[in-house]
């Protein structure tokens, strides 16, 4: 599921790291045996891609950044480390 996002970020020399806790949370929240992978895609778009997009638009995350999606204190988080 993260392959598409990673390839889009690679165009800007950015990398995406997803912690095991974040993967587990996304898999649990996005699992739906009736609808298949669609809820999973929506969850990734809503919770991860939107946050990355906002950081890019605000200029907080720059080309070459390492972006990490994590899960802490019951919440999905996205942080980034810009190149020096």
Image (cartoon, rainbow, N blue to C red):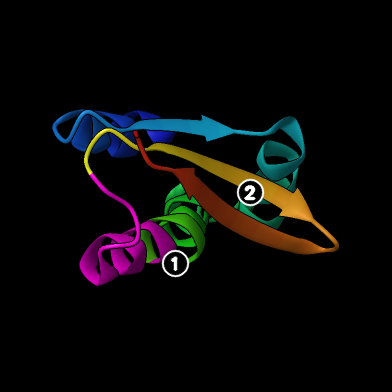
Question: Residue 3's x, y, as percent?
Answer: 35, 28
Other residues around mark 1 within 10 Å, as few (<14) / some (14–19) / many (≥20) = few
Q: In this view, does 36 lie to the left or right of 53?
A: right
Label 1: state its secondary structure. helix
Q: Does the magenta stretch include residue 59?
A: yes
Question: Residue 77's x, y, as percent?
Answer: 62, 58
Q: Main secondary structure of the magenta part?
A: helix
Q: Residue 16 carries which label?
A: none
User: Over which residues does the magenta segment extend?
Assistant: 51-62
Q: Which is closer to the viewer, label 1 or label 2?
A: 1
Q: Does the magenta stretch include residue 53?
A: yes
Q: Nearer the viewer, residue 10 or 33?
A: 10
Q: Residue 33 carries which label?
A: 2
Q: Quadrant of residue 34?
A: bottom right
| Residue that carries the numbered disc 1 in the rendered image | 46
Other residues around mark 2 within 10 Å, as few (<14) / some (14–19) / many (≥20) = few
**How many numbered discs, if any?**
2
């Amino acid at each position: 599921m993260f392959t598409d996002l990673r390839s889009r970020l690679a165009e800007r020399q950015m990398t995406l790291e997803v912690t095991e806790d974040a993967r587990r949370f996304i898999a649990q929240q996005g699992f739906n045996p009736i609808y298949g992978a669609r809820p999973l895609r929506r969850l990734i778009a809503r919770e991860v891609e939107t946050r990355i997009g906002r950081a890019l638009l605000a200029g907080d995350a720059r080309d070459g950044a390492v972006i990490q999606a994590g899960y802490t204190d019951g919440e999905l988080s996205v942080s980034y480390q810009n190149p020096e």
